[in-house]
Image (tube, rainbow, N blue to C red):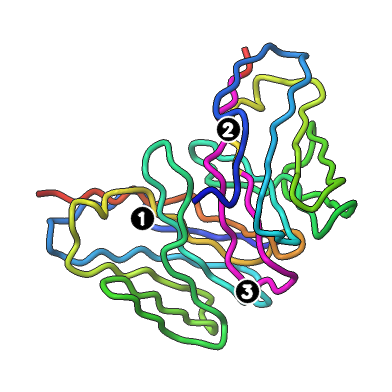
Amino acid sequence: GENVEQHPSTLSVQEGDSAVIKCTYSDSASNYFPWYKQELGKRPQLIIDIRSNVGEKKDQRIAVTLNKTAKHFSLHITETQPEDSAVYFCAATGGGADGLTFGKGTHLIIQP
Amino acid sequence: DAGITQSPRYKITETGRQVTLMCHQTWSHSYMFWYRQDLGHGLRLIYYSAAADITDKGEVPDGYVVSRSKTENFPLTLESATRSQTSVYFCASRQGANSNQPQHFGDGTRLSIL
């Protein structure tokens, strides 16, 4: 089945700097790559997603890039703010009926 | 948003007991999913359902049972709870069969088994 690796597990950046989280996946048939943000005690919330026919997608301060040849995708957050502090999960289709396979998460800490 | 609701939000029970976690969605989404979230493992798929009366196993189905008699409900049952099933359980739904559509999650149930 699908395997998704996510790095780093913890990322600390200064407020205003950029943050990059990287994921790799194993199943070349995967075609959908969402990113979720999860605050403590809350549900995972979809923040951006990308489909396999697109190389890059941007939404204000957040962008995702996809390299299907290398089987990796990345989340970029620019001009980080304190409210960006959370755990971020990448995922890829590959589970049953294309359920999601998740990475283990990145704890993003924004230092004031 | 209130489109997908889970109950209870918190549950404490003992080993060997049966416990059922409820999931209800108001979007008429055909696909529904159950995940568990554990430290160090992220979220893992337990079971999923493509429609009423159609269910199938995910990555970690052992010890769990699901049913889907109505499109809007997808309960998850632990028939004889074990301590290893202590976890946070999330239900999710997706509109249709296309795998590149987003999944939306409920608020989760925090289950502790003593």
Query: Which residue type carries mark 2?
Result: Thr
**In the rendered structure, are the residues bearing label 2 and label 3 in contact, judged by CB atoms less than 8 Å apart?**
no
Please report the residue visible at 78 percent of the width from the left and 20 percent of the height from the top. B18
Q: Which residue is mark 2?
A: B109
Image quadrant containing the C terminus of chain B: top right
Query: For residue A50, which numbered disc appears in the image?
Result: none
Judge left or right: residue B93 versus residue B17: left
Please report the residue visible at 48 percent of the width from the left and 82 percent of the height from the top. A67
Give whichever of A31, B13 is nearer the camera: B13
Give whichever of B47, A30 is nearer the camera: B47
Query: For residue A8, which numbered disc appears in the image?
Result: 1
| Distance in Å between CA atoms under marks 2 and 3 | 26 Å
Seen in the picture, residue B90 relative to A82 is either above or below; the reply is: above
Q: Position of residue A39 (x, y in %)?
A: 37, 44
Please report the residue visible at 83 percent of the width from the left and 48 percent of the height from the top. B70
Query: Which residue type carries mark 1?
Result: Pro
Q: Magenta stretch?
A: B91-112
Which is nearer the N-term, disc 2 or disc 3? Answer: 3
Q: Which chain is home to disc 3?
A: B
Nearest to the eye among marks 1 and 2: give it: 2
User: Is label 1 on the same chain as label 3?
Assistant: no
User: Is label 2 on the same chain as label 3?
Assistant: yes
Seen in the picture, residue B107 relative to A46 is either above or below; the reply is: above
Please report the residue visible at 59 percent of the width from the left and 60 percent of the height from the top. B103
Q: Which residue is mark 3?
A: B100
Q: Which chain is home to disc 2?
A: B
User: Is label 1 on the same chain as label 2?
Assistant: no
Which element carries disc 2, helix, strand or loop? Answer: strand
Q: Which chain is home to disc 1?
A: A
Quadrant of the image occupied by residue A63: bottom left
- Within 10 Å of disc 3 (Cα), the crowding (few <14, some 14-19, many 20+) is many
